[in-house]
Image (tube, helix red, strand yellow):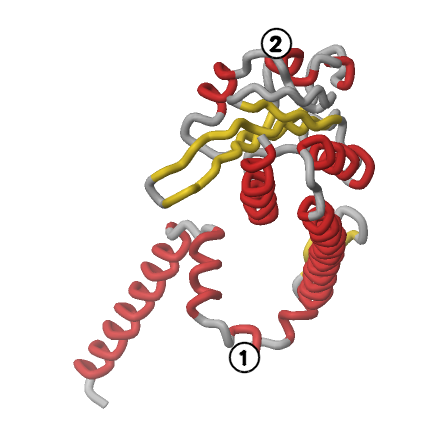
Amino acid sequence: MKKEDNKQIETHQENNNNLIDNTLLNLDELPLSDEIVGTYLQSNPDFFNRNPQLLTSLRINNHQQGAISLVERQQQNLREKIHLLEEEITQLLAVANSNEQLFTVYNDLYLQLIDCTSLEQLLTCLHQTTTQLLSLADVKIWLVNKTDCNHHCIINDDCQAILNNRLAADDYYFGRMQKSELALLFHNNEIFNSQGTGSAVLIKLTNDKTSNNTTTLGFIAISSQNAEHFDPHMDTLLLGQFRKLVAKLLAPLI
């Protein structure tokens, strides 16, 4: 072999070594972050299939169990997810059971209301269902047109301001109310604690004679000692049926 050829080979090897050294230097300078590793693993979902030994060799710190393998961590995460799903299912079953009981109460109430032949009977039925079966604090009704009925559920004071403020744009109001409003509506404001943190719902009663002719009869006020019981995000499906039926039965009685 000629000397020129040997020299070319040595030069080529030297260039390769320099290229390798520069590449290693560049790799050392490249910051390897969690984001880069995570992006690589997401882009290569079969990485652990190609490297199964890593599943058991990688160790992850756990505050309760110490160092555990990746497989054990995956199993732990799966158990936690199953536990959360079981809790959600339990909550859903509890809500379903509560809704079933509530539907039964409303259904019985509707049948009783239909049989009422006087305003006194209707109000007594509402009060018994609200306070005894639903375990709420009190129920009152305010009518735009005064009536001769002296039932304890009827509010005789002027509540037009409450109607205008709370029910001007909506058929319902849920949540906390001012102490002055509670005192005007329920009189026995002691049902609320000293901070006045009870909650209430106001239900507007309207007599829809035609689509363009609606008369406001008044509103029903129901109170609870629990400040969180009547929440603005409450569903109004059952209340909507209740509101329409009561208004329809109430109109001819007043």
Horizontal side of 171 relative to 56 (left or right) equals left
**Circle 2 sits in a helix, a strand or a loop, which is it?**
helix
Tell me if label 1 and label 2 are in contact, CB under 8 Å: no
- Looking at the picture, does residue 141 appear above or below residue 6? above
Q: Quadrant of residue 127?
A: top right
Residue 132 at x, y percent in the picture: 82, 36
Viewer-proximal residue among 106 and 20? 106
- Residue at numbered disc 2: 180
Quadrant for the N terminus in the image: bottom left
Q: State the image coordinates of residue 187 (x, y, percent, origin top left).
A: 70, 13
Residue located 54% across and 30% down the image: 173
Which sits in the foreground, 132 or 142?
142
- For the residue pair 159 and 118, the one nearer the viewer reads as 118
Q: Is residue 80 visible?
A: no
Quarter containing the C terminus: top right
Q: Is residue 203 above or below residue 93?
A: above
Residue at image x 63%, y 12%? 184
Dividing the picture into quadrants, the one containing residue 86 is bottom right
The extreme bottom residue here reads: 1
**Is 39 rendered above or below residue 188?**
below
Q: Return the residue at label 1.
A: 50
The mark that comes first in sequence, 1 or 2, is: 1
